[in-house]
Image (cartoon, rainbow, N blue to C red):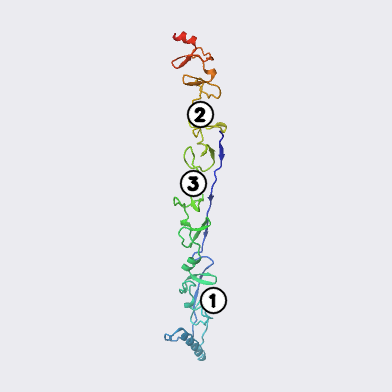
């Protein structure tokens, strides 16, 4: 039979690692500035009133102060309520805000001078921004705030991208994929690669396909003498490969005279098989071509030699 050498396939891949925006870096991260618009004299705080009353009183106060010669300065209008700002002002995103109106677009908490992120012109606190817009880790589903691994069309925390079997992180060798999961080289081949019929270990590279099985090239040898097959030919006996000599030995078709395979005519005698030319008298070595002989001590003799030696 002939053997076939095949190159083993591989799903070997590499992941990419990128930096995602941290609180102190990235183009979507900002800081607001807080300034105070002051008047030329101190005024007592107004009594507690409603928002509408406060706006009305503030307008009247500004007009009265101007009539009395007191210089007041407005810092534009608030981007949220569109009303004039007198006092502290938040400057952010190229706009001005009352401090109490500069809030997270999602949770409405005041941002003040804290770090914030921008999305579509709106400010967000850091937790909400990452929960809403940051990529999610395929392992823990948490937002990714720092370095991000991209692999298998998903994103992962660097510490969460590891072998699905042994839990070890991947080195420069990358990983192998099976059913959407990443595996290290050793576990992938141990779990999913074909097994060698000779040693039962995983086949990671080239292999031989023969006898409905796969084999490491070094393992595909004669089952008895462990010698490789020259010319790629071998003999099958009960599903195992043998060289010609040991194949015939298993089948009992080796010549008892020369110990070589019998492929043509043979003589069967004394529970053994012989090439016709090797079935000879043990004393005179003449061929017992007529098939008549006498046996002594498991050896064949012609009649003449037998009578001379044992008669």
Q: Mark 3 falls on what kind of element? A: helix
Can residue 91 be seen here? yes
Alpha-carbon neighbours of circle 1 within 10 Å: few (<14), some, or many (≥20)? few
Q: Mark 2 or mark 1, which has the lower sequence index?
A: 1
Q: Height in image: 127 above or below 73? A: above
Judge left or right: residue 207 versus residue 49. Answer: right
Numbered badge on residue 95 = 1
Q: Residue furthest left?
A: 48
Q: Mark 1 falls on what kind of element? A: strand
Residue beneath disc 3:
192
Spatial CA distance of label 3 from label 1 is: 60 Å
Q: Mark 2 falls on what kind of element? A: helix
Which part of the image, by quadrant, shows the N terminus? top right
Q: Nearer the viewer, mark 2 or mark 1?
A: 2
Which part of the image, by quadrant, shows the C terminus? top left
Q: Nearer the viewer, mark 3 or mark 2?
A: 2
Q: State the residue in front, 135 or 276.
A: 276
Q: Mark 3 or mark 1, which has the lower sequence index?
A: 1
| Residue 70 locus on image (x, y percent) | 50, 88
Q: Height in image: 135 above or below 282? A: below
Q: Mark 3 or mark 2, which has the lower sequence index?
A: 3
| Residue 253 locus on image (x, y percent) | 51, 25
Can residue 23 be seen here? no
Residue beneath disc 2:
247
- Check if mark 2's residue and mark 1's residue have beta carbons within 8 Å: no
Numbered badge on residue 48 = none
Spatial CA distance of label 2 from label 1 is: 92 Å
**Where is residue 230, by image quadrant?**
top right
């Amino acid at each position: 039979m002939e053997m076939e050498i095949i190159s083993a396939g591989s799903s070997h891949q590499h992941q990419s690692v990128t930096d995602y925006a941290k609180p102190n870096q990235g183009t979507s991260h900002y800081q607001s500035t807080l300034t105070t618009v002051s008047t030329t004299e101190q005024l007592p705080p107004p009594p507690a009133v409603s928002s509408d009353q406060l706006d009305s009183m503030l307008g009247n106060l500004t007009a009265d102060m101007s009539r009395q010669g007191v210089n007041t300065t407005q810092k534009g209008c608030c981007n949220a309520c569109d009303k004039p700002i007198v006092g502290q002002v938040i400057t952010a995103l190229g706009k001005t805000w009352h401090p109490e109106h500069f809030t997270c677009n999602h949770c409405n908490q005041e941002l003040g001078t804290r770090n914030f992120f921008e999305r579509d012109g709106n400010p967000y606190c850091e937790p909400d921004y990452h929960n809403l817009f940051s990529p999610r880790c395929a392992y823990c589903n948490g937002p990714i705030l720092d370095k991000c691994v991209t692999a298998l069309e998903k994103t992962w925390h660097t510490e969460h991208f590891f072998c699905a079997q042994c839990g070890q992180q991947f080195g420069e060798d990358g990983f192998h994929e099976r059913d959407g999961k990443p595996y290290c080289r050793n576990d992938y081949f141990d779990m999913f690669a074909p097994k060698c019929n000779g040693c039962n270990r995983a086949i990671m590279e080239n292999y031989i396909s023969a006898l409905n099985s796969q084999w490491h090239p070094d393992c595909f040898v004669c089952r008895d003498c462990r010698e490789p097959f020259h010319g790629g030919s071998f003999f099958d006996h009960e599903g195992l490969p043998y060289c010609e000599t040991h194949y015939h030995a298993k089948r009992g078709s080796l010549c008892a005279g020369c110990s070589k395979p019998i492929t043509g005519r043979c003589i069967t005698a004394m529970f053994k098989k012989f090439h016709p030319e090797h079935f000879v008298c043990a004393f005179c070595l003449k061929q017992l071509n007529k098939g008549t002989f006498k046996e002594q001590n498991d050896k064949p003799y012609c009649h003449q030699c037998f009578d001379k030696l044992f008669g």
